Amino acid sequence: MTRKRKHLSFWLGPVAFFVLQAPLSAATLHVGPGQAYSAPCAAIAAASTGDTILIDPVLYMNDTCEWKTNNLKLIGVPGPNGERPHIDDSGLTDTPTTRHLAYHKGIWVPDANDTLVANIEFSGAKLSNDDGANGTAIRIDGVNITILHCYFHDNQDGLLESNVAGSKVVIKYSEFYRNGVSDPGSAGYGQTHNLYIGHCATLEFAFNYSHEAKVGHLLKSRARVNYILYNRLTGEAGSDSYEIDLPNGGTSYVIGNLVEKGPNSQNDGTSLAYMEEGANASNPGHDLYVVSNDFVDLDPHPITFVNIGSAGTTPAVLQNDIFYAVYGSGTPTSQANAILKTNFSGDPLFTNLRKYDYQLEMGSPAINDGSEPGVVNGFDLQPKFEYVQPTCGQSRFTVGIIDIGAYELGGGGPMLDCR
């Protein structure tokens, strides 16, 4: 399945920026039918440090590779109707006598520094039980990666980061759908996720759409510092467990997100889990800031929306959040000493709950009922944007007193250039 994007006349702006920022000595390599390279991995093998690889929007079957070349920019060229180049490795069988994912890890395995991946679709990453059944579209083995406008679906793992100390991971404007393993007999059952970030330095996850994971989490991160900003993280018809899992804590900012637990969740008691696997030396910060989010639960069982493990003794800050258990009962957090300020529990009068439109209707009790969240650690907790489907955002301005939740009635400003 190839996803399409609208308004592509403006999309080339970010691509042009990254190409223009390449060193003057860098080359541009072209991939596609009739181009110098017929498949992306052939161009990657030929590339030198700082090169840009432009990939035409066609299907590339069973192409997989690892590389150590730094500062590569791998950019999909959009088709006339918004098509992305699509790398589908579903034909690789992962046996000793047949082809398998690179290094038995992933479709792409950048063991290199400062990689950019933009506007590419990945699917079909699969490993056997003997290899762990955690095949991933991109296995991040290097330092620093930026992923923009990509689509990851029907892999055992969408992304998997390999605990690279000091690495900065940036993921924006991307979609993660139906990654994971649903077979209880598989080694990957419950261990594979839409994306899983290990013990890196920072994760910036913004304006993304992660939904309908198979059994695993919509977002799992062990990063030292997490910036989880303005995303849609919705279980929908999938069987995901947690919508956000931060198992070893870390200083974490969760701001302006739409978080929905669907009726088929494998873990119906928690939306955001924090420090449930205990403390870790890689994550000295145990401070969590959950501000201006919409939490919705469509499961009939009781839920604790923000569940904090016993090792999490630093008071979490929950401010200006909506907690709405549609069919059952909900508790904002399990932490007795958490700081709760101007949150709202109950029906906030969303515009269209069933269509995931969580903007506020006129007359909502959440309007003009919030409070200014301030600045911590030099980071402003005030929401600056609102999520816009799909994988985009718009500016947010306060009208009167700040509204509770991820949207400000009448306060939506200019759209970001997300294309």
Image: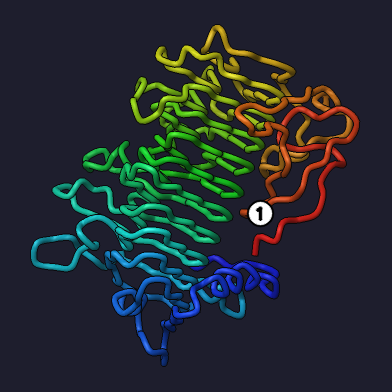
In the visual, does 16 lie left or right of 99?
right
* Residue at the disc numbered 1: 392
Instruction: Name the kind of residue labelled 1 in the image.
Output: Cys
Tell me if I can see residue 330 in this picture.
no
- Residue found at x 58% / y 28%: 297
Q: Where does residue 300 sit, x and y in percent of width and height?
A: 55, 23
Residue 59: percent from the left, percent from the top?
41, 76
Image quarter for residue 261? top right
Q: Quadrant of the C terminus?
A: bottom right
Q: Is residue 406 above or below residue 99?
A: above
Image x and y of residue 362, in percent? 88, 34
- Tell me if residue 157 can be seen: yes
The colour scheme used here is rainbow
Label 1: few (<14), some (14–19) or many (≥20) C-alpha neighbours in 10 Å = many
Nearer-the-camera pick, 141 or 186: 141
Q: Is residue 57 left or right of residue 15?
A: left
Residue at 42% across, 53% down = 144
Mark 1 residue element: strand
Q: What residue is at 14 percent from the left and 48 percent from the top?
A: 130
Q: Is residue 17 above or below residue 195?
A: below
Vertical position of residue 280 compared to residue 61: above or below: above
For the point 78% across and 22% down, the residue is 371
